[in-house]
Amino acid sequence: MKVGKVVGSLWATRKDDKLNGLKFLVVKPIYGHDNELFIAADNAGAGVNDLVLVTTGGGARASLENSQTPVDAVIVGVVDSIEIENEE
Amino acid sequence: MKVGKVVGSLWATRKDDKLNGLKFLVVKPIYGHDNELFIAADNAGAGVNDLVLVTTGGGARASLENSQTPVDAVIVGVVDSIEIENEE
Amino acid sequence: MKVGKVVGSLWATRKDDKLNGLKFLVVKPIYGHDNELFIAADNAGAGVNDLVLVTTGGGARASLENSQTPVDAVIVGVVDSIEIENEE
Amino acid sequence: MKVGKVVGSLWATRKDDKLNGLKFLVVKPIYGHDNELFIAADNAGAGVNDLVLVTTGGGARASLENSQTPVDAVIVGVVDSIEIENEE
Amino acid sequence: MKVGKVVGSLWATRKDDKLNGLKFLVVKPIYGHDNELFIAADNAGAGVNDLVLVTTGGGARASLENSQTPVDAVIVGVVDSIEIENEE
């Protein structure tokens, strides 16, 4: 899964009906290419500035009530903390 | 999901019959590698210059009436606005 | 989906029986990293020098008669033309 | 599959209920872009500093008891050794 | 699918039981980023120095007897030859 920071929101009135009711957030990855922002549907009550755990692909759909929702990234958790250990 | 701008169209007469009736648009990502144009089937009535929300993978097929359509990217929404918040 | 040019062919005698009868073509992407050649099974009667539309992932298998064929990229169309519009 | 070193842990209290009971580890890939850390659910009793084998996508979910768990990366093994042969 | 050269082997005693009996090989891609080695389960009797055809994702699992095996890359063929044509 990816970890990212929620930096914004996306609105789309004209869309697949199966997306109705979902909140779309803009996520900035904290590892790797931090310019590769992407959009995730929220399933954890996340908001701007939250650090979030994002599941992609079929696993993203498994998080939603209707697993046939046409999404490929879902926020599945709000991160409390990440602890990186000192290398041996 | 990815956000991109529709920059063109693709035509293919000789193709898998299961693709008949679909409109194929060329999408330029607005985040990350903007030279990595890709093709998406349209399911939101999008056109050139529209900013669109694109779902990839199995979620793309979930958007279409026949979930066995051989596509891997579908335009699921036309973006009204993206609001990026100031960082804390 | 990706667009690429067919630049060659691949032969493998020793392979999973479920791949028998498929034609494997070498495809060079026309957008992005053009050195990242990949192999796609042909389902559109494509040949060398053709510009082709390639579906990846589960959508690729959806194109074939047996959706349990162990492939991850299938040529689903031969491109007639791509029209890129002038930017506004 | 990817090989990586476990470098830390992630905690998230507020999350999809289907993730309860899983341990989330931070994995640093040993090949390719080593700054692209990612999060994997542990299914091999792994801990910090272990070298691990990680399966992504639908295969990751296949490792867990409930294949509808919303994850996209699972640690499926702790690596004993990797032997790279001299090139011919 | 990807083409790569088998450069080594990986051993993991502590692993998901569903992986028992599989041989894990280290594959070096011949196109693109050749430092992005990855691990594939072997389903074609491949060995070190073989040039192999690798299917990823759900297609990889489709190659194995048990399609619920937690892998994301399987060697589905040993390559006899790749013929790249001169460009027009």
Image (cartoon, coloured by chain):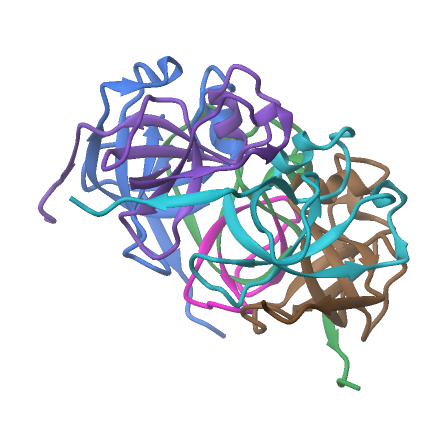
Chain colours: A blue, B purple, C cyan, D green, E brown
* Residue placed most toward the observer, B5 or D80: B5
Give the percent coordinates (x, y) of residue C58: 62, 35
Q: Residue at x 70, y 55 (%)?
A: C25
Q: On the picture, is A28 further left or further right than B19?
A: left
* Residue placed most toward the observer, E11 or B65: B65
User: Toward which corner of the image does residue D12 lie, by quadrant?
Assistant: top left
Q: Is residue E70 visible?
A: no
Q: On the picture, is C88 further left or further right than E43?
A: left
Count of number-bearing discs: 0
Residue A23's place in the image compared with C27, above or below, is above
Q: Residue at x 50, y 21 (%)?
A: B21
User: Toward which corner of the image does residue D73 lie, by quadrant?
Assistant: top right
Residue C61's place in the image compared with D3, above or below, is above
Q: Is residue D27 visible?
A: yes
**Which stretch is magenta?**
D27-55
Residue D52 magenta-drawn? yes
Q: On the picture, is D34 further left or further right than C58?
A: left
Q: On the picture, is E75 further left or further right than C46?
A: right
Give the percent coordinates (x, y) of residue A83: 38, 56
Residue D57's place in the image compared with E83, above or below, is above
Give the percent coordinates (x, y) of residue E19: 79, 47
Residue E9 magenta-drawn? no
Give the percent coordinates (x, y) of residue B47: 29, 30
